[in-house]
Amino acid sequence: MTLEPLIHASHAIQIHTAAALSAFALGVIQFAAPKGTLPHRAIGWAWVGLMATVCISAFFINELRTWGTWGPIHALAVFTLVMLPFAVLHAHRHQVASHKRAMTSLFLGALVIAGLFTLWPGRIMHRVVFGS
C-alpha cells in the first residue's frame, strides 16, 4: 500500500477521495449507532455534506469518459445530489422507513459499489491499495 499515486493526483481526486473515505467511516458509525438521537442527526448532516462534496468534486474528475467529457461517475453524482435532499426530507417528515431505505441505498450504491470500481486495475485507488 502506498499513498504516492494519490499524492500525485489532482486536487479534485484528493478531495473526492478524502470526502468519500470520511463519508464511508461516518456511514458505518451511523449504521451501528442509535437512531433518532442528536448525535445521529449531527453525524447525518456531516455525512450529507461529505456526500455532496464527493458528488461536486466528481464533476472535476474526467478520467473515465463515456459520453464526451462525462462518464458513469458523473451520472451517479447527479443521481446522488438529487436523492440526498429526498432522503433528508423523509427524516424531517418522520418517514423512518423511507429515510432508512434512501440512506442505505445511497451508502451502498454511491460509496460501497462505486468504491469497489475504484479498485479496478489501472485506477489510482488500485495503485494505492495494491501497488503498481
Image (cartoon, rainbow, N blue to C red):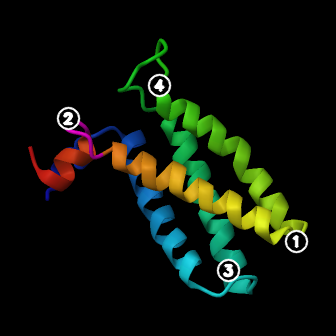
Vertical position of residue 63 compared to residue 32: above or below: above
Q: Helix, strand or loop at disc 3?
A: helix
Label 2 to label 3: alpha-carbon separation? 37 Å
> Residue tagged by mark 3?
40
* Residue designated by label 4: 71
Q: Position of residue 129 (x, y in %)?
A: 19, 55
Q: Which quadrant does the N terminus fall into?
A: bottom left
Q: Residue furthest left?
A: 132
Residue 2: x and y in percent read 14, 56
Q: Earlier in the sequence, mark 3 or mark 1?
A: 3
Q: Which mark is residue 122?
A: 2
Disc 1 from disc 2: Cα separation:
44 Å
Indicate the amino acid at tag 4. Answer: Gly
Query: Eyeballing the image, is 16 above or below 64?
Result: below
Q: Disc 4, disc 2: CB below 8 Å?
A: no
Q: Which residues are magenta?
A: 119-123
Pointer 4 with pointer 1, Cβ within 8 A: no
Q: Earlier in the sequence, mark 1 or mark 2?
A: 1
Residue at 27% of width from left, 46% of height from top?
119
Q: Is residue 15 visible?
A: no
Q: Residue at x 70, y 67 (%)?
A: 100
